[in-house]
Image (cartoon, rainbow, N blue to C red):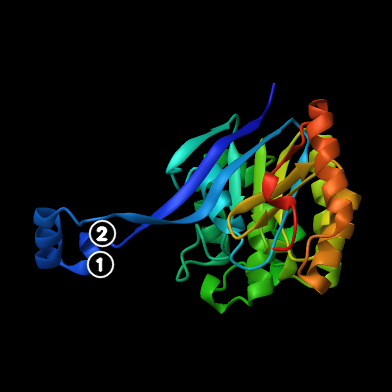
Amino acid sequence: MSVIEVKNVSIGYKTGDFKSIGLKDYVIKKLLGTYDVRYFWADRDIRFSLEQGDLLGIIGSNGAGKSTLLKAVSGIMVPTEGQVICDGRVAALLELASGFDPDLTVRENTFLRGAILGYSKAFMLDHYDEIIAFAELEEFQDHAFRQLSSGMKSRLAFAIASLVKPDVLILDEVLSVGDGAFRARSEEKMKEMMSGGTTTILVSHSVGQIRDLSTKILWLHKGQQIIFTDQVQQVCDCYEEFLKTKTLPAALKELTDLAQAYPKTGAVADKSTEGAI
């Protein structure tokens, strides 16, 4: 049984409605029959499924729709079309400061964030020292959260989300903020969580990180799904070539054909993979 199912999800933003043109113009256009609501599609017809213990790496240039898709999967945003089914407790780290109060201390924010994730005070008391130690913030427990550096905030956010062992962990460029040593420890922790059954979605501009951690990969471009497959290394190769040439390599066409020929792998390819982007 799938832990996450994204079924033909599209996320659009209205443009040209009465909020942008004004009430007077809206009434006139409505009377003349020329009123037209248009959509800007941040994501269009995205579809994939993940099993327990999968780690999905999402790649794509800026504006590809990666962060918007994560908001839909985490339940922050309702898709305009399609459906997201997510089974289990979700911990989503989409922004460093999300779920934290800048004026509360590190200690207070740890319990606040835990409560937001649905954990009891007793549970957080049992895990508090472990969280602070993993985040390397023992000397900053009574400092205000706003006094922390971005790397410290990242460490605390990841430590809380990972050490409370969610069923689904969603990370949006969070690991790129910490130093090299913390990134290495975080990656080891993620591998440990995967072996324990946690399903993870990771957005990262680091192709190397996607290569090392992912069991499946999703490539998005301008809101379109280029390919979803378990052929992680091959897609990473194609993506690195694309970053240099801005043209889809021929090898990607072979991968999409393979994905369509062998649906048992869970791979789905978009028809827009032919030609240059």
How many labels were placed on the picture? 2
Q: Quadrant of the C terminus?
A: bottom right
Find the residue positioned furthest to the top. 1
The amino acid on which the numbered mark 1 sits, given as a three-letter code, is Ser
Measured as percent of width and height from the top left, residue 223 is found at 58, 55
Query: On screen, 81 above or below 277?
Result: above
Q: Quadrant of the N terminus?
A: top right
Task: Tell me the crowding category of disc 2: few under 14, some 14 to 19, or many 20 or more residues within 10 angstroms, Cα based.
Answer: some
Residue at 16%, 68% in the rendered image: 22
The amino acid on which the numbered mark 2 sits, given as a three-letter code, is Asp
Q: What secondary structure is marked by label 1? A: helix
Query: On screen, 119 above or below 262?
Result: below
Residue at 52%, 67% in the rendered image: 105
Residue at 60%, 43% in the rendered image: 46
Name the disc covering residue 1, or none: none
Measured as percent of width and height from the top left, residue 178 is found at 74, 70
Decide if residue 16 is on the left or right side of residue 93: left
Residue 173: tell me if it is visible. yes
Measured as percent of width and height from the top left, residue 258 is found at 86, 37
Query: On screen, 233 above or below 151?
Result: above
Q: Mark 2 and 1 residues: CB-CB less than 8 Å, in contact? A: yes
Measured as percent of width and height from the top left, residue 174 is found at 68, 62
Q: Which residue is tagged 1?
A: 20
Task: Tell me the crowding category of disc 1: few under 14, some 14 to 19, or many 20 or more residues within 10 angstroms, Cα based.
Answer: few
Quarter of the rendering containing residue 267:
top right
Residue 184: tell me if it is visible. no
Quarter of the rendering containing residue 107:
bottom right
Decide if residue 269 is on the left or right side of residue 195: left
How far apart marks 2 and 1 lie (CA) works out to: 6 Å
Q: What secondary structure is marked by label 2? A: loop
Decide if residue 56 is on the left or right side of residue 15: right
Name the disc covering residue 17, or none: 2
